[in-house]
Image: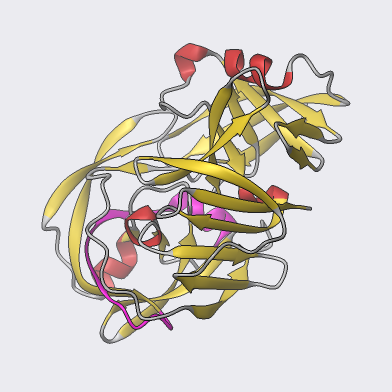
């Protein structure tokens, strides 16, 4: 039987609380590169003399640097952190970056970033030299437009179109608060996932036992391991007031779901555009 690999780049790194925001200097538009696997990359300034392409990952709490780039730049470990995925927790080295920035933004950030070999990431984004996480992104309002390969970032009001949703945060990551009248549940809006993953009980409450049009076996792959899973194929579904296009879905048993309070990961690739404002507690999505 064919086993389909699914990607979960989502990582939690400690410390998970973003550093204080720096003064905002307007809003800019940056070009994105979208890989064949649909992963968005943004140009960043790692040090004063080196720019690189990093995965723009809304589901990652912290920024990560590829181990090879750290060696090339002569950056030495200055501390340690924990990296947590659905599969495991591991200790990783960290390095200090004194002036990290998204190219185009006139604001720099001092960050302690994880160093990792990023083997999984590079399968879907071969040119990626790191991951931009919520220790940077949550300081801003941002709109990711994969259809036109651009990122708008700074401080700006939500567009009037699209489906508006309240959000909270979990370890800095945006959690969409979905309410179908029977109760509210939270899904992390994740540019680093290509399959909808939910804790099984929460999925049953959210969408019931909607019959899929097909089933297959899959393998959820994370930075720290993999898991063979049953995969449901749906022609679409409605979650609260959001109509989702065709998608693959995995229901994980409660004992395999290690994240809280969120009960699932919702791929941002299901939408042509996503807007997130942590400061306003609001997100907007445009289903494909």
Which span of residues is magenta-colored?
103-126
Residue 192 lies, with reference to residue 48, above or below; the image says above
Residue 49 lies, with reference to residue 187, above or below; the image says below
Residue with the most extreme left position: 78
In this view, the residue in front, 210 or 157, is 157
Callout count: 0
Residue 124 sits inside the magenta stretch: yes
In this view, the residue in front, 137 or 119, is 137
Horizontal arrangement in the rendering, residue 276 relative to residue 171 (left or right) = right
Percent x, y for residue 170? 39, 38
Q: Quadrant of residue 203?
A: top right
Residue found at x 22% / y 45%: 15
Residue 188 sits inside the magenta stretch: no
Q: Is residue 126 visible?
A: no
Percent x, y for residue 12? 35, 41
Residue 150 lies, with reference to residue 223, above or below; the image says below
Render colour scheme: secondary structure
């Amino acid at each position: 039987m064919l086993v389909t690999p699914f990607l979960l780049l989502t990582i939690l790194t400690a410390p998970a609380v973003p550093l204080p925001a720096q003064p905002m200097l307007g809003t800019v538009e940056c070009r994105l590169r979208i890989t064949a696997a649909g992963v968005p990359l943004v140009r960043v300034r790692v040090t004063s003399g080196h720019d690189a392409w990093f995965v723009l990952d809304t589901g990652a709490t912290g920024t990560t640097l590829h181990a090879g780039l750290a060696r090339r730049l002569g950056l030495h470990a200055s501390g340690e952190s924990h990296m947590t995925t659905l599969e495991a927790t591991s200790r990783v080295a960290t390095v200090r970056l004194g002036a990290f920035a998204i190219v185009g933004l006139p604001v720099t950030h001092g960050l302690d970033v994880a160093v990792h070999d990023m083997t999984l990431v590079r399968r879907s984004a071969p040119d990626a030299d790191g991951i931009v996480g919520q220790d940077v992104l949550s300081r801003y309002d941002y709109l990711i437009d994969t259809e036109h390969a651009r990122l708008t970032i700074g401080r700006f009001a939500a567009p009037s179109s699209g489906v508006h949703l309240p959000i909270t945060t979990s370890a800095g990551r945006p959690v969409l608060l979905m309410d179908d009248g029977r109760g509210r549940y939270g899904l992390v809006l994740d540019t680093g996932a290509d399959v909808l993953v939910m804790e099984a009980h929460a999925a049953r409450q959210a969408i019931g036992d909607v019959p899929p049009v097909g089933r297959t076996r899959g393998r959820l792959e994370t930075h720290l391991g993999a898991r063979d899973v049953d995969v449901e194929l749906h022609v679409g579904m409605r979650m609260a007031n959001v109509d989702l296009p065709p998608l693959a879905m995995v229901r994980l048993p409660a004992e395999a779901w290690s994240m809280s309070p969120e009960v699932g990961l919702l791929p941002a690739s299901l939408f042509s555009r996503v807007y997130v404002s942590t400061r306003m507690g609001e997100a907007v999505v445009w289903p494909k």
